Image (cartoon, helix red, strand yellow):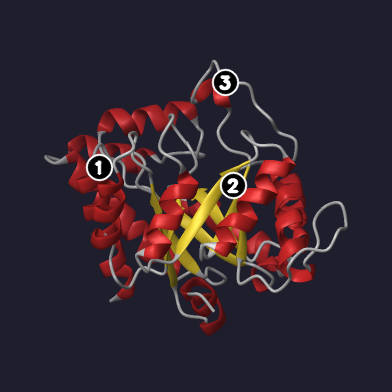
Amino acid sequence: MNRLAKAMMTGNLIVTAECLPPRGSDYHEIEALASSLPENLDAAVIADNPDAIRGSAFSAAVMLARKGRCAVLSMATRDRNRLALLSDALGAAALNVAAILCTSGAHACSVCPQAATAYDLDSVQFTQAVKRIVLYGAGMNGKPLEPGLDLQVGATAHPYLRPIELNLLRLKKKIIAGADFLLTQPVFDLDGFSLWMRSVESKDFDKRSAIIPSVLPITSLKRARALQDSQIYGPIPEEVIGRIGKARDEAAEGLAIAAETAMRLQGMRGVRGIHILCGGCESTDERIRAVRHLTAALKS
């Protein structure tokens, strides 16, 4: 049983972190990343071209797994049809990747506008297809495959989408489809997240899937205002904007806010872990520092 599965079974706080593949093909960057991640991190989630064309998430996840890391491969249905999705999922399992995070992915217009999209499956269908392979050894066409995969299946959740009834309906579909864990969009508005979490608890969804909210260190006032204007992650409280704007070191203040948010989230009933997002950091060194700082705070 891989480390992520053990963490989910024990009931201990799960701490995971996002890892961005390099923009080039230098495998030494992946080796450096593997050696730099905190030893007590439960899993590294390898992002699948979230913001630009990057090195293969599949390759990065496999390399991290070979270095002894618990690697979660994020796969976006945006880029592959069901043949490619399930083939890569099987290949990842064969190469000791711990889990597949089933996502739709950011639309290509924000990553590579010239690219055509696939969307042969949506994220719910993809979650169900991977879980079917894990449980029954069968593909979507019903033909038998090799059963008994040691592979967890994850999906994403957005706690700020409203109306909340439709939000919970989509969440229920992902849980029924077989999501073992759910990573949320980054949390800034704790009151809004608490409202969503209480609704999740009222349906007992937290007992069927590990709810793991995300935190995102904001590196600058400019970045904070851009997130506030876009509302892509839900509301950014004015308190957050004000603290970063008044800080002498904006990045350090953003990290402090993320740490405070993480500590408050881990104390909420029904929360099983914390996912650290660092896609806004400008360099690998900054991401590693943020992951180390937050992991140390949560695991102490």
**Marks 1 and 2 in Cβ contact (< 8 Å):** no
The residue to which callout 3 is attached is 115
Q: Residues within 10 Å of mark 3 (few under 14, many from 20)?
A: few
Please give the residue where the numbered disc 2 appears in the rendered image: 158
The quadrant of the rendering that contains the C terminus is bottom left
Q: Answer above or below: position of 12 versus 62.
A: below
Query: Mark 2 or 3, which is nearer the eye?
Result: 3
Residue at (34% x, 46% y) in the render: 278
Q: Which residue is mark 1?
A: 243
Where residue 4 appears, x then y in whole percent?
50, 71
Residue nearer the viewer, 190 or 117: 117
The answer, for residue 187, to whether it is visible in the render is no
- Residue lying at 64% horizontally and 57% vertically, measured from the top left: 90
Q: Judge from the rendering whether residue 167 lies leftward or rightward of residue 284; answer left or right.
A: right
User: Element type at marker 3?
Assistant: loop
Tell me the residue at 71%/67% (across/down).
Answer: 134
Q: Amino acid at mark 1?
A: Arg
Is residue 132 visible from the viewing direction of this image? yes
Residue 69, image x, y percentages: 38, 66
Crowding around mark 2 (Cα neighbors within 10 Å: few <14, some 14 to 19, many 20+) is many
Asked whether, in this view, residue 229 is left or right of residue 224, the answer is right
Residue 43 at x, y percent in the picture: 43, 64
